[in-house]
Amino acid sequence: EAGVTQSPTHLIKTRGQQATLRCSPISGHTSVYWYQQALGLGLQFLLWYDEGEERNRGNFPPRFSGRQFPNYSSELNVNALELEDSALYLCASSLVQGRTEAFFGQGTRLTVV
Amino acid sequence: AQSVTQLGSHVSVSEGALVLLRCNYSSSVPPYLFWYVQYPNQGLQLLLKYTTGATLVKGINGFEAEFKKSETSFHLTKPSAHMSDAAEYFCAVSGAGNQFYFGTGTSLTVIP
């Protein structure tokens, strides 16, 4: 069974540009979580989607947005990129029917220059 | 509301020594608790989890953790550290609505 897949693995963007990160959850998982992991800052919760709806949002500006598609895959968009957006972006998925563990992808390394 | 506190952002142990990583949580509902490990430039991998039942939980790579409700703790231990255990460790709690809350992580260094 395929795990959580994220694309691209690495992304280099210029300040002011937009970045789009993609996540495919494990088959059958309806919840998708996004986290930002900047150097030395641990895991910062960004967004939680379930059944196509945004369930919760972390303390990030509106230029961080996303969506979940009918097949439960998800997209994270970051507009007007700033240098401090450089980080590892992790996606995780879980079942919602029960409180079960989250499974993580390998992440997308975003570098803003 | 749920939250997790990991005591000690950096822990160093000698190879072969006991590993103890501390995690305390708060939860308004019976918690589900997790420990994850992260190797450099990789995603998080589940080490072990507590949902219900036995409070001593065994995980992969020789790690175990004990759920202590009275102390609101879920400390991670391993009797004998190995060089390959050097990594970042995260404690997490899943509460009402199935959202996950992560601690700030503990970086484990194993000294040869």
Image (cartoon, coloured by chain):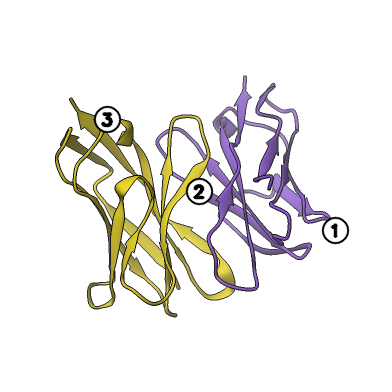
The image position of residue B58, as x and y in percent, is: 34, 59
Q: Are marks 1 and 3 on the same chain?
A: no
What's the mark number on residue B83? 3
Q: Colour of chain A?
A: purple
Does residue A19 appear left or right of residue B94 in this picture? right
Report how far apart the C-alphas of labels 2 and 1 lie in the structure.
26 Å
Q: Chain of mark 3?
A: B
Nearer the observer, A12 or B34? B34
Dot 3, how many residues are within 10 Å of its Cα: few (below 14), some (14-19), or many (20+)? some
Q: Quadrant of residue B18?
A: top left
Element type at mark 3: helix
Q: Residues within 10 Å of mark 1 (few under 14, many from 20)?
A: few
Name the residue at 18% across, 25% down: B112
The x, y position of residue A39, in whole percent, is 44, 32
Q: Residue B51, which numbered label?
A: none
Q: Which chain is yellow?
A: B
Q: Are marks 2 and 1 on the same chain?
A: yes
Amino acid type of the residue tagged 3 in the rendering: Met
* Marks 1, 3: nearer the viewer: 3
Tell which circle, 2 or 1, labels the residue nearer the N-terminal end.
2
Name the residue: 28% across, 38% down. B108
Mark 1, secondary structure of its residue: loop
Q: Amino acid at mark 1?
A: Pro
Picture coordinates of residue B82, whole percent (x, y): 25, 34
Is residue B104 in view from this perspective?
A: no
Q: Label 1: which residue?
A: A70
The quadrant of the rendering that contains the C terminus of chain A is top right
Kind of residue indicated by mark 2: Gln
* Position in image of residue A43 (x %, y %): 48, 46
Q: Which residue is mark 2?
A: A44
Decide: is B112 above or below B67.
above
